[in-house]
Amino acid sequence: MAEIWHPFWQHGLKEPIFEIACTQDEFLITNTGKKIIDGISSWWVNNLGHNNPYITDAIKKQACIMQQIIFAGFTHKPAIETAEKLSRFLPSKFSRIFYSDSGSICVEVGLKMAVGYYYNKFGKNKSKIVAMEHSYHGDTFGGMSSGAKSVFNRPYEKMLFDVIHIPYPIKGREEITIKEYEKILKSNADKIGAIVLEPLVLGSGGMLFYEPFILDELYRLSKEYDVMFVLDEVMTGFGRTGTMFAFEQSNITPDIICLSKGLTGGTVPLAATLCTEEIYNAFYGQDKSKMFFHSSSYTANPISLAAASAALDLWKDKKPLNDVKRINNYYKAHVKNFSNARILGGIFAFETDGAKNDYTANIAVKLYRYFLENDVLLRPLGNTVYVMPPYCIKEESLDKIFALLENIA
Ligand SMILES: *Cc1c(COP(=O)(O)O)cnc(C)c1O
């Protein structure tokens, strides 16, 4: 029998691997009955709680009707309904939606849309991409290329396409980032097709926050130099930062937005890339060589879309934001017990002392073990400890998490 090779997991450290038998709300329940609080929404996907009954029901129903069909030349009700419901929450600028299966892919789709737009419309080769230092856009080659050069991709560095990174905007010194972007645009604008950013928070980079006005400034420059503005809201989308989408806290609407993780409430895989009519039009016409050459076998899977459609019903009146607010208030009441914690919407983060900020830092393994021994799943990024729970988390579960955090702060 083939032994299972787990992702982002050093098997040589011999940490135990728990078998989860079932889930409920904010809990992962092992086959021996251990009830673990999922403090990181199972890698940032599960926003609406495990086994949400409404979404579960939609998945069950759809599974009996239709499970998978080809999406080239065919469509189905869950795909149409999801597009319609999602549009209620987004500016009309996003007139086209393209479905795919994962966060990495929906970002790659966004980059292909941008670069393809300039090629199809003007015959221009604007294939250079700008991204931010410390950013993370997934583990595919496009995702790795756009993301920070780090321990995640070192062996593959030579295989990655060339991306220009602008500095992370450190609070109070944001000018540096903006000036640097302007400098890059001045000398390369005819080559740059897109800038891709995680809005307001760099997740894997260590839950690094930055101010909304940075998005305004970078957008303004992008338009001045005719560069597509792509926001990777894979993690931030669907309430994480306190608004339905992070870009709502700025004054701009991007040209392309990439959504995944919370799109189905965190139940089944799905992603979507939305873009403007102008971008779509560059691919539209009688010429087959100009169509958008992208798909995966399971594109627009009906079960995934039924889940997304149901999750979007639960977003009616943006109700889940009330829970994000409740969690945010809880954080605010506890932040005084930490010397250097930061809060954004449903995210709480701080650095533990005495360790360098390195993903492979031993402290991360020690803390991970300590939390799990106490029935809490938190997975520090190096010495950055963060909490990002499903929005349904109960106060007593937060109490349990924060009792542990206050012990190690
Ligand atoms: C998780 C994540 C991705 C990658 O999504 P996958 O579904 O794991 O491919 C891309 N961008 C951001 C910001 C993410 O947090």
Image (tube, rainbow, N blue to C red):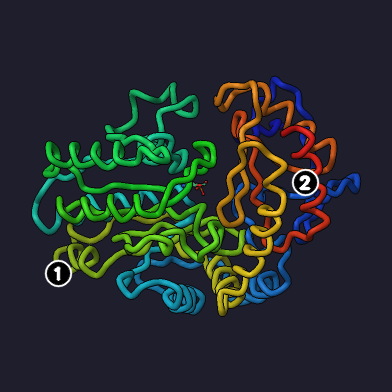
Mark 2, residue position: 401
Label 1 or label 2, whichever lies nearer to me, is: 2
Indicate the amino acid at tag 1. Answer: Gln
Disc 1 is placed on an element classified as loop
| First-in-chain label (1 vs 2) | 1
Residue at the image point whose x is 49% and y is 36% from the top = 205
Residue at the image point whose x is 77% and y is 53% from the top = 398
Mark 1, residue position: 286
Instruction: State the count of labels.
Output: 2
Q: Position of residue 73 (x, y in %)?
A: 35, 71
Q: Looking at the picture, tell me which residue is in the foreground, 223 or 342.
A: 342
Neighbours of disc 2 within 10 Å: few (<14), some (14-19), many (20+): many
Neighbours of disc 1 within 10 Å: few (<14), some (14-19), many (20+): few
Residue at the image point whose x is 57% and y is 64% from the top = 264
Indicate the amino acid at tag 2. Answer: Ile
Q: Position of residue 87 (x, y in %)?
A: 42, 75
Q: Quadrant of the C terminus?
A: top right
Quarter of the image where one finds residue 384: top right
Q: Is mark 2 within 8 Å of ligand 1?
A: no
Quarter of the image where one finds residue 342: top right
Q: Position of residue 162 (x, y in %)?
A: 27, 32
Q: CA distance from mark 1 to mark 2?
A: 58 Å
